[in-house]
Image (spheres, rainbow, N blue to C red):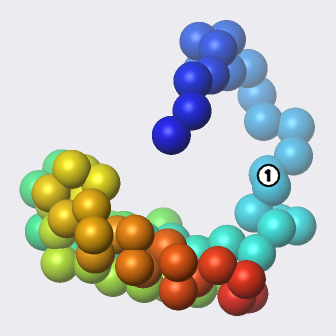
Amino acid sequence: LARQSVQVTGQPVGAAAWHHVPSAYLVCAQDRGTPARLQREFARRAGGVVELDTGHHPFLSQPAALADLLLNLEGTG
């Protein structure tokens, strides 16, 4: 995670990096805010889809599992 300017929330996106950079979508299966079925719909255009049995904040609830998943994704796509 990195800081970013609040200005990004009010400016249109000129280019979506996921069109040019290998990407994957992480479905958080136990997310109570965004159901997994909806996340899978969002993920349709991603280069890959991975699923973790966690809530909305896997970096807090399952940091080791998330780290393993990210390390396994590195360099793929």
User: What residue is at 53 percent from the left and 78 percent from the top?
Assistant: 71
Q: Is residue 66 left or right of residue 73?
A: left
Q: Secondary structure at mark 1?
A: loop
Q: Is residue 15 visible?
A: yes
Q: Is residue 52 left or right of residue 46?
A: left
User: What residue is at 57 percent from the left and 33 percent from the top?
Assistant: 2
Q: Residue type at mark 1: give it.
A: Ala
Q: Is residue 41 visible?
A: no
Residue 61 percent coordinates (x, y): 15, 57
| Residue designated by label 1 | 16
Q: Is residue 12 left or right of residue 48?
A: right
Residue 22 percent coordinates (x, y): 76, 75
Q: Where does the C terminus fall, quadrant-wise?
A: bottom right
Figure quadrant of residue 66:
bottom left
Q: Is residue 70 left or right of residue 14?
A: left
| 75 vs 66: above or below | below
User: What residue is at 21 percent from the left and 50 percent from the top?
Assistant: 60
